[in-house]
Image (cartoon, rainbow, N blue to C red):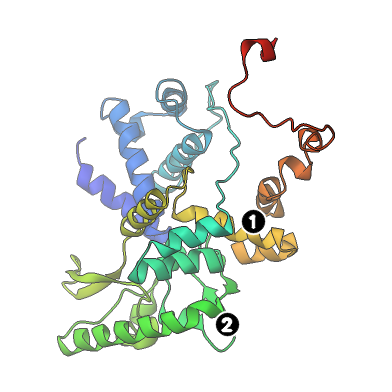
Amino acid sequence: MPGKSIFLQTVHDKARTKRLSLRTERVYRRWIVRFIRYHGSRHPNQLGETEVAAFLTHLAVERQVAASTQVQALSALLFLYQTVLGRALARLPEMTWARSRSRLPVVLTAEEVAAVVGRLGGVYQLIALLLYGSGLRLLECLTLRVKDLDFGRGEIRLRSTKGGAPRVTVLPRSVVAPLTQHLEGVRVVHQRDLAAGAGEVVLPWALGRKYPNAGREWAWQWVFPASRTYVERETGVVRRHHLHESAVQRAVKGAVRNARIPKPATSHTLRHSFATHLLESGHDIRTIQQLLGHRSVATTMIYTHVLNKGGLGVRSPADLLDGQRGDSVIFRGRPTNEQVK
């Protein structure tokens, strides 16, 4: 694509103007590049509603993506035309939409959570406890800063959230002691970085210009910093990023496998388990909605379908049969053909 680097720089500048998260910017950029390549690397100014509809149909029919993935691609293309190119898309022609599939979240029992957490060590165990004990999303946990932890009130104040809306959730008392010990080690590393002329973290938006020294202050440091530093390409400043999500995801996957839990559980499953177990213990759904940061209570309602009470809380009539006769109706071995007949 001619002028690719200049064009993508424009995409980057517009994303910064709109204050999109860096993750959203990367996702949008990938979709924009895929859209342009699908149409033979033609400039988007030469493409319109027909080409957008053709690309989205291609995703649904040939790539068989989920409905949420197709909507994500549409959002990226709307950003491309409305914000980057300054041209609003008209009504799209007839196209094929991906079928929406509702899935119940995977939930672990309390015993399974304990088995997974017990097979993790060090910082990964601490992160897993926060995911389960506070209902955090993985990136929300990894982007925590020291100032976000309120040990006195037993709260975690979240600012870098999905959707950008700040919220408060619970800080488990059982995590306070290991978390305090962990922060002592992080502070030693921070002091060492400062002595070496580093120790400055990235601050959100324009705070770095407003408070030039804040990036070196202890309050703004990551709770879970990476083990290595890096040199920022634009400024040449030596910084330390937070721990990467993939490292935690691999650790949790390994713990689930070692615990021999026959469920497709991930780090996000711990958040689902947090919500479900709160419902089981009698907490109201509005409170759980606020702790999770859901905009609508309808999103939180999905956890009412996975409560540990069987299907919709109904006791199966088959469970009433045992004991109604002198001999048990529970199968002892494989039934014979005569029994089946």
- The quarter of the rendered structure image containing the C terminus is top right
User: What residue occupies the far front of the structure in this picture?
Assistant: 326
Is residue 275 left or right of 3 when viewed as pictured?
right
Q: Position of residue 7 (x, y in %)?
A: 27, 45
Q: Position of residue 283 (x, y in %)?
A: 73, 65
Q: Residue at x 47, y 28 (%)?
A: 49
Q: Dots 2 and 1: beta carbons under 8 Å?
A: no
Q: Residue at x 44, y 25 (%)?
A: 64
Front residue of 86/216: it is 216
Circle 2: element type:
loop
Front residue of 111/213: it is 111
Q: Position of residue 115 (x, y in %)?
A: 46, 59
Task: Looking at the image, tell me whether mark 2 or mark 1 is earlier in sequence order.
Answer: 2
Amino acid found under the numbered disc labelled 2: Gly
Residue 19 in view, yes or no: no
Q: Position of residue 102 (x, y in %)?
A: 61, 36
Question: Which image quadrant is residue 184 in?
Answer: bottom left
- Label 2 Cα crowd, 10 Å radius (few <14 / some 14-19 / many 20+): few
Is residue 132 left or right of 234 when viewed as pictured?
right
Front residue of 170/178: it is 178
Q: Could you tell me how far apart the alpha carbons at marks 2 and 1 are, in whole angstroms? A: 21 Å
Residue designated by label 1:
276
Instruction: Give the answer, above or below, for where 147 lies relative to 14.
Output: below
Residue designated by label 2:
154
Amino acid found under the numbered disc labelled 1: Thr
Instruction: Give the answer, above or below, for where 23 lies relative to 154.
Output: above
Q: Nearer the viewer, mark 2 or mark 1?
A: 1
Q: Residue at x 45, y 30 (%)?
A: 65
Q: Residue at x 34, y 67 (%)?
A: 121
- Label 1 Cα crowd, 10 Å radius (few <14 / some 14-19 / many 20+): many
Residue 150 in view, yes or no: yes
